[in-house]
Image: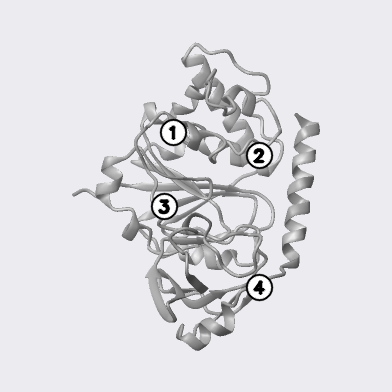
Amino acid sequence: MKQISIAIVIPYFGRFNNYFRLWLESAKNNPTIDFLLFTDQEVDSFNNIKVFKSSLQDVSNLAQRNLSEILKEKGLPIISGCGRINKPYKLCDYKPIYGIIFKQYLKNYDFWGHCDVDLIFGNIRHFITPEILYQHDRILSCGHFSLYKNTYENNLKFLNSRGNLIGIPSYEQVYSSDKSFSFDEWPGMSKLWSTMNWSMYNTTIFDDIYVLRKHFISCQKIEKDFGISNVIFAYDNGHLFRFYFRNSKVVKEETMYVHLQKRPMKVETNSIDKYLIVPNKFIHYQHPSAIVLRKYGNKWLFYPNAIKIRLNNLKRKITDKFEH
């Protein structure tokens, strides 16, 4: 079976987080997947890491040109401010149309996708097999990682949000405003994909860590994880494992990635190949024994950073309200 080519697009402007080098190494350790990084920061290209020195204005210009071209081609009105991106966070709303915006860079790939850099990858191809790719038009529904089959029809599915009746914003609303609509998540295109019953593989093969607790809780696995405790992760040369207690026994399972969201993380290891991920730091590798899980994975009842996150979210909502 022919290997299906994949490119993941990451426009990122401004300073990277303090563990970016760990994200970068985890991406490098998926050598059959290309990562196209558009950034104003200094990052070296490497085999599957394709770096394009760029600015937010450059991406905004590209979005305006390619989005307007598609609307004109389909005989649809060009919306006011079409594709104008004035702040980096607004890029989240544009993730579902990266296949349009970056089409010149994606023409030789079978699938394109997007991801965040506040995560650590394991072995992506272990979880997303050729059979899954052949059978589905979209892989996963989250803004922090999704893949789309790179076809003309698939890339234009966002147009179906126009005049819809299922309670999601239309692309005209989203791409004519500076307000954040979470168009890349369930309030937007993911809900449309589900409602329209389009072909999407949406199994939880990753760990999206709940940001308002210090100890690790995987948001989409709450029911499945009932009865487990003391969760930590181990990165080992391109593979990522979750360890936890169930019935007083240590359980090990491989996962595709761990998404750490807005969680502040300390880096207390020099290794980029093998380390542990615990609340809230990257530390030198040690065998994830019961002693290690008890030491690092305990439940925390009070987490001061949760207050800061809630205040920042409220501030963003207020800002969006006045910008709308």
Q: Nearer the viewer, mark 1 or mark 4?
A: 4
Q: Quadrant of residue 178?
A: top right
CA–CA distance between discs 2 and 3? 24 Å
Circle 3 sits in a helix, a strand or a loop, which is it?
A: strand
- Reply above or below: 262 against 181: below
Identify which amino acid the numbered label 3 is placed on.
Asp
Using residue 90 as the reference point, say whether residue 166 is left or right of it: left
Looking at the picture, tell me which residue is in the foreground, 208 or 286.
Answer: 208
Using residue 51 as the reference point, say whether residue 240 is left or right of it: left
Q: Which residue is mark 4?
A: 300
| Image mark for residue 193 | 1
Q: Nearer the viewer, mark 1 or mark 2?
A: 1
| Image mark for residue 281 | none
Circle 4 sits in a helix, a strand or a loop, which is it?
A: loop
Using residue 92 as the reference point, say whether residue 324 is left or right of it: right
CA–CA distance between discs 1 and 4? 37 Å
Identify which amino acid the numbered label 1 is placed on.
Trp
| Residue appearing at x 40%, y 57% in the figure | 205
Counting from the top left corner in percent of width and height, residue 70 is at: 49, 21
